[in-house]
Amino acid sequence: MAKSQASFQKRGVKHALSNEREVSSIPRYYLDHDNNDAPDSAHISADAVSNGDNEKHWVYPSPQQFYNAVRRKNHNARAEDMDVVVPIHNAVNEEAWRRITEWEDAWKSDADAPSPQLVNFVGRPRDITWRAWFRGLAGYEMPFDRHDWVIVRPRSEDDQAPQTMRYIIDFYAGRAPSSSSTNSPVSFYLDVRPAPSSMEGIAMRLHRWWMDMKLGADQDEERDVFDAI
């Protein structure tokens, strides 16, 4: 597909931004089969596209859309940075979804159960979680962003209502880049866990804690650091 370009003029500097959007690997859940009752999302990635087999996936904003959204929020942004910022944004979201599916796979009792789907998600950067607050007291940096993602667990039987689960994601800056290298990867630490607002969310956390203790899993946060690019 040929990339369409949109030109942006700012202070006499012209930089072309792509309008091409990338389809994510994250399946999107709709409330009815006709896709006429889609929930709203407070995030800029609010559209879905068909992959040809009647399944829908979330689609990420183009560099032009991302830039426009950042500017509307009165954040400092440079058009020439979008070709780097947008792939990082997409990679972080893909990793967040991978962590969520890990939680779901470890919890479900039926290995053949349908995979979860994302209903909606919202950014809540000003709402600090208790875990992030306690980490701050311990001397750690505070997260630079927080999202709440609501997923649905589709049922195998038509007469069974799907279950929902809300996940909390705190986003932290990862390892500092090496001063000796100009090509150091950009890394992030994602703290992904079920919200403790339901008994099931609490049970999932306790189950993860018990399995980590039983298997002697490394509790160091370094295991949750990943390189976005």
Image (cartoon, grey):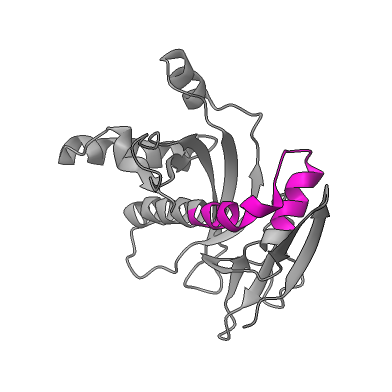
Q: Nearer the viewer, residue 226 or 199?
A: 226
Q: Nearer the viewer, residue 121 or 80?
A: 80
Residue displayed at 59% across by 56% down: 86
Side of 86 relative to 173 (left or right): right
Q: Nearer the viewer, residue 130 or 140?
A: 140
Residue displayed at 48% across by 35% down: 172
Say above or below: 42 vs 173.
below
Side of 66 relative to 51 (left or right): right
Side of 187 relative to 120 (left or right): left
Say above or below: 81 vs 199.
below
Q: Quadrant of the N terminus?
A: bottom right
The span shown in magenta is 65-91
Side of 140 relative to 3 (left or right): left
Which residue in the rendered view is the most extreme toward the bottom? 52
Name the image quarter holding residue 5: bottom right
Q: Nearer the viewer, residue 79 or 14?
A: 14
Q: Position of residue 63 (x, y in %)?
A: 67, 60
Name the main secondary structure of what is drawn in magenta.
Answer: helix
Residue displayed at 52% across by 52% down: 88
Q: Position of residue 91 (x, y in %)?
A: 49, 56
Q: Position of residue 228 (x, y in %)?
A: 44, 51
Question: Is residue 89 found inside the magenta-colored segment of the image?
Answer: yes
Say above or below: 26 vs 196.
below
Q: Is residue 44 visible?
A: no
Question: Is residue 27 found inside the magenta-colored segment of the image?
Answer: no
Residue displayed at 55% across by 35% down: 197
Q: Position of residue 19 (x, y in %)?
A: 71, 68
